[in-house]
Amino acid sequence: MSPIYRSEEGKSSILQEYEAYLDELGDNFTREYVETRFGQTHVLLTGPEDGKPLFILQGGNCVNPMTLSWFSSLFNEYRIIAPDTIGHPGYSEETRISARFDSLALWVSDLLDYYEIKKSAFIGPSFGGGIILRLATYIPERIACSVLVAPAGLAVGSKLKMVQDIVLPLVTYRMTSSPTSLQKIADRMSCNCMKELDKNIIGKIFKHVSLEQDMPKLTEKEELVNYTSPTLLLVGEKDIFFPADKLIERAREIIPNVKAVQYDTGHFPSQDVLTQMNREIIQFLQENYK
């Protein structure tokens, strides 16, 4: 197994940031390790124990508490189950597994079985949304409803723009630790509104982690023939990775029961947009997850 971290010092630094971010979210979390067929998975849990289960799947190349912070308005009503994605920064097994076929769906299936959940609602931004689309392909009967936030697995933005605005500054940042390069990336990902805490963590991940580059495969219409669960798609008009127009067009072609909402935001939403998104999610869950 190849470690995802470039050094033990880098790993320790990122896990310290993980703990600090978790502290920012409050003290109502418990955590445990679950054995899956792909290795040990670290899971964060919060919300009422008798609440309806809601899986939140983290974005790629970030840390779980960062993703959770986007959806904190849901913590009081639902039983939140948030695994550190295997092979990504966090406390789960560092083993990388293919995002292109059924492995990630089987990984989530193991977690559902462990918690004795027949079906659940799911929320996933970016890479996490791509995992949900893999679930919809291989085990659609276990999804009660889903929220895809700027998901991988539907369509992608301009590769030329990504090279110019993300890849080249990233190479420069890794070589020089230039704050200007990191700020350029943060601004392009978030339309100039990324929190300092998020930028700091992303900078450390860029420096100390061998980034996951194997995104969930683009989903084909025939793969979702058995998926009929209500689906909410939330997208950003200025998302450099997954632009709103491309995602909405593709989603309407291949997802039978989808509602799409777009916002004037980038891949990382502003706080105002997150507030709007959470209102939309709460209403969606109230209507479709009873």
Image: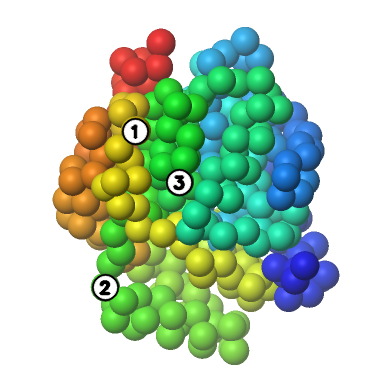
Q: Which residue is mark 1?
A: 226
The three-letter amino acid code for the residue at tag 2 is Ser
Q: Quadrant of residue 107?
A: top right
Whether pointer 3 and pointer 1 mark residues with C-beta atoms closer than 8 Å, the reply is no
Residue in the image at 29% along x and 46% along y: 222
In this picture the colour scheme is rainbow
Front position among marks 2 and 1? 1
Q: Residue 106 appears at what percent x and percent y? A: 59, 42
| Mark 3 surroundings: few (<14), some (14-19) or many (≥20) residues within 10 A | many
Q: Disc 3 marks which residue?
A: 134
Q: Secondary structure under badge 3? A: helix
Q: Is residue 1 left or right of residue 265?
A: right
Residue 16 appears anywhere in the view: yes
**Type of amino acid at the residue the image marks with label 1:** Asn
Residue 194 against residue 284 in the figure, above or below: below
In the rendered image, residue 212, in percent from the top left (x then y), is placed at 56, 67
Residue labelled with disc 2: 158
**Side of 73 relative to 80 (left or right):** left
Give the CA separation, mark 2 to mark 1.
31 Å
Observer-nearest of 250 and 43: 250
Q: Which corner quadrant holds the C terminus?
A: top left
